[in-house]
Image: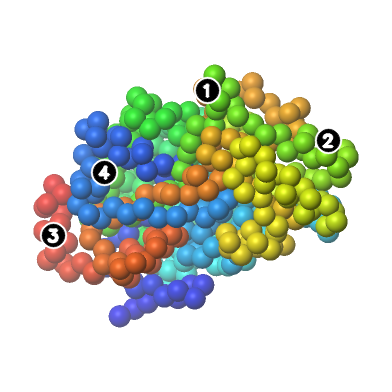
């Protein structure tokens, strides 16, 4: 049987097109509430059929570290992407980590393409595209920049005509719908062996599970998933992280401004707080998440750690080595301390550096341990070893190695069953 090896894991060749979906910010509750509303029959079927699991995402529970873990099959300690931002001590600069030069491991997608598989990647935001498509001989484009896709850069052109939908605003539910619509059209017209679809959490940042906005999003997604399955694909779905409300009882954001605190404790500018959630698109969360890393003088780090750990609203404060061991992070891209806040609390730098004027709904965000549990769903039965604790980045392993190959006859039956 043909297999492909990447980052120390071996994967069996797909016996039918495999569509891996990463639903950004998909707290498990979103699926359960949408299913019980009756508006997501396909997802409800998966939840009922015993092919739905819960898995642990990578901490920090942010988009890029988790998407990269999913496509490489390994934690950030191996692939190197542990946030949107890190502080480069040598260059004395805060740098964006969305350039593929920061990626330290090849993707499973690229490995399959090298072995001759037809591979396609569609992401909502362009910030992920270059990382996901690194070294990939295949199709890779974002909804955001769909109109600019070229054969040379993206392996495909005329995407907007193919999808038949106008390019949506970067702050919209439609940006994710475009991803699914593109997935369906690609499966219909080119039938990739392996497809990776990654959405954006614009809706999840605004709408709580069970709300009209959330249920409408999942009803939309459900229609496309059913179509993809109807076209004969195996569907595997997970999330990069969960999502929680981060507000006080009065609805205002519950923020601990770490830089202000540290400036008061040890002197202005003596410590540097980095929020790896920061990126060019911060309107919907004001760059506030539940994970921060702090650079400071070694002589001050234990005292500061103890004081932080004692603060109301802090889940844990760890030294670099302890945090990197526990969360499998690259030590050279983390600060001296790692700080994680509790479920409904977020971490900021200085109050003056956060523009919250764009927040038109009560703050919902992620980054901490409280957003680590995510769904892991498959459209066919998997055989998973008893006692195995699943990670979201096991999704390719389970899809390819733990679900029996589909024979031609069974594939036909399956298509009839799914209508
Ligand atoms: Zn995300």
On the image, numbered disc 1 is attached to which residue? 249
Q: CA distance from mark 3 to mark 1?
A: 54 Å
Q: CA distance from mark 2 to mark 4?
A: 50 Å
Residue 217, position as x, y percentages in the image:
36, 32
State if disc 1 and disc 3 touch (CB < 8 Å).
no
| Residue bearing the label numbered 4 | 43
Q: Residue furthest bottom?
A: 1
Which element type, helix, strand or loop, lies under badge 2? helix
Q: Dots 2 and 3: beta carbons under 8 Å? A: no
Check contact, mark 2 vs mark 4: CB within 8 A: no
Q: 119 or 307: which is nearer to us?
A: 307
- Cα distance, mark 2 to mark 1? 27 Å
- Percent x, y of residue 46: 24, 49
Residue drawn at (36%, 66%), measured in percent from left and top? 388
Q: Which residue in the structure is indicated by mark 2?
A: 264
Residue shown at 45%/34% (left/top)?
A: 204
**Residue 54 located left or right of residue 106:** left
Q: Position of residue 108 (x, y in %)?
A: 47, 66
Q: Is residue 12 visible?
A: yes
- Tell me how far mark 2 sits from mark 3, CA to CA: 68 Å
Nearest to the observer: residue 14 or residue 200: 200
Task: Please tell me which of labels 2 and 1 falls first in the chain.
Answer: 1
């Amino acid at each position: 049987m043909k297999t492909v090896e990447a980052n120390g894991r071996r994967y069996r060749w797909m016996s039918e097109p495999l569509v891996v979906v990463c639903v950004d910010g998909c707290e498990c509750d979103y699926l359960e509430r949408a299913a019980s509303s009756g508006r997501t029959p396909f997802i409800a079927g998966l939840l009922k059929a015993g092919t739905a699991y819960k898995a642990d995402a990578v901490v920090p529970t942010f988009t890029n570290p988790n998407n990269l873990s999913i496509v490489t099959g390994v934690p950030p300690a191996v692939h190197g992407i542990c946030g949107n931002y890190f502080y480069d001590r040598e260059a004395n600069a805060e740098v964006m980590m969305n350039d593929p030069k920061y990626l330290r491991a090849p993707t499973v997608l690229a490995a399959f393409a090298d072995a001759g598989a037809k591979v396609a990647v569609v992401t909502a935001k362009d910030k992920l595209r270059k990382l996901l498509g690194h070294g990939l001989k295949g199709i890779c484009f974002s909804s955001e920049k769909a109109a600019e896709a070229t054969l040379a850069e993206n392996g495909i052109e005329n995407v907007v005509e193919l999808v038949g939908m106008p390019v949506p605003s970067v702050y919209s539910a439609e940006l994710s719908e475009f991803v699914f619509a593109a997935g369906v059209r690609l499966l219909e017209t080119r039938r990739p062996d392996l497809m990776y679809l990654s959405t954006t959490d614009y809706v999840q940042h605004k709408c709580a599970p069970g709300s009209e906005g959330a249920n409408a999003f999942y009803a939309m997604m459900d229609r496309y998933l059913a179509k993809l399955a109807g076209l004969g694909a195996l569907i595997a779905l997970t999330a990069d992280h969960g999502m929680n409300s981060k507000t006080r009882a009065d609805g205002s954001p519950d923020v601990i401004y770490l830089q202000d605190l540290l400036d008061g404790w040890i002197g202005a500018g003596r410590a540097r707080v980095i929020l790896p959630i920061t990126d060019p698109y911060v309107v919907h969360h004001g760059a506030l998440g539940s994970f921060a890393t702090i650079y400071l003088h070694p002589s001050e780090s234990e005292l500061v750690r103890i004081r932080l750990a004692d603060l109301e609203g802090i889940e844990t404060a760890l030294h670099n080595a302890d945090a990197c061991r526990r969360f499998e992070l690259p030590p050279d891209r983390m600060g001296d301390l790692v700080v994680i806040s509790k479920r409904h609390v977020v971490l900021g730098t200085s109050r003056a550096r956060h523009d919250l004027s764009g927040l038109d709904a009560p703050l919902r965000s992620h980054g901490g341990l409280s957003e680590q549990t995510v769904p892991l769903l498959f459209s066919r039965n998997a055989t998973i070893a008893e006692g195995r604790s699943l990670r979201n980045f096991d999704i390719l392993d389970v899809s390819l190695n733990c679900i029996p190959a589909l024979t031609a006859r069974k594939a036909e039956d399956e298509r009839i069953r799914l209508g």
